[in-house]
Image (cartoon, helix red, strand yellow):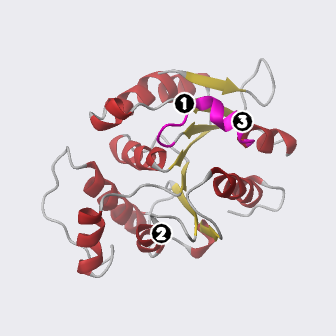
Amino acid sequence: MRHLIDLAKPGQYADTLVILLPGAYQQPEDFIKEGFVQAVRQRQLGIDLIMAELSFSHIADQSALSEIYSYLIQPAIAAGYQNIWLAGISVGGYVAIAYAGRYPRQLAGLLLLAPYLGNRMTTGEIAVAGGIQAWTPDAISDEDIERLNWHWLKTHAIAAETELRPIEVHLSYGEDDRFTESHLMMAQILPATRVDKIPGDHVWPVWRQLWHNFLDKRFGKNSHD
């Protein structure tokens, strides 16, 4: 799995690693071009970054999950990282949720930036049921990642009330995003402090501002989360 690495301090690992997963037709280099790395470095945060590449074929056959595990997460654990986050844009957010469901207890948190949460058939089923809390799906096949992702979000929200250190799930999106309806459904099961909505569409300037907001809120000097 092709990826780029940017360390907070050259030659040594920080305690925290954020793995950035791109959206459709995006490359790891785009995170540099769009200022994601600069945003972390200008704040002098002790966070290392990995920018990964995702291919549609590997997302479709789910091999992206095993590649993230083998090429990124396992080496990160071996390197001694204490907190590993996945931050995904659009379909990268879809992959991040799927990874959390497939490999539990490896991650400290997820940042989902305007995540793709499923086609209209899937999201419509949940909406008709009265929302994710009322949704009670039948058995879900291992191939049905969209519904598995929603089921994980639902069960994680319930388990988070009792687990000592549940995965932090943060949702950030533009209020004019084309996936807003599904974002609103997801927001219903998250603490309000972990949902960030700003004006804008499904575009880099919005995601960049949401990234700045997340860094200040979660890792800034006045962070209490």
User: Would you place residue 151 above or below residue 197 in this image?
Assistant: above
Q: Is residue 130 visible?
A: yes
Residue 180, disc = 2
Report the mark closest to the observer, 3 or 1.
3
Please state the horizontal and vertical placement of residue 37, each as a whole percent of the image. 74, 37
Q: Nearer the viewer, residue 125 or 5?
A: 125
Magenta stretch holds residue 27: yes
Q: Give the residue at mark 3.
A: 33
Q: Nearer the viewer, residue 159 or 44?
A: 44
Q: Give the residue at mark 1.
A: 52
Q: Residue at x 25, y 73 (%)?
A: 135
Is the residue under label 1 in contact with that under label 2 (CB below 8 Å)? Answer: no
Please state the horizontal and vertical placement of residue 204, each as a whole percent of the image. 64, 50
Mark 3 or mark 1: which comes first in sequence?
Answer: 3
Please state the horizontal and vertical placement of residue 96, each as a whole percent of the image. 45, 45
Mark 1: few, some, or many residues within 10 Å (few <14, many ≥20)? Answer: many
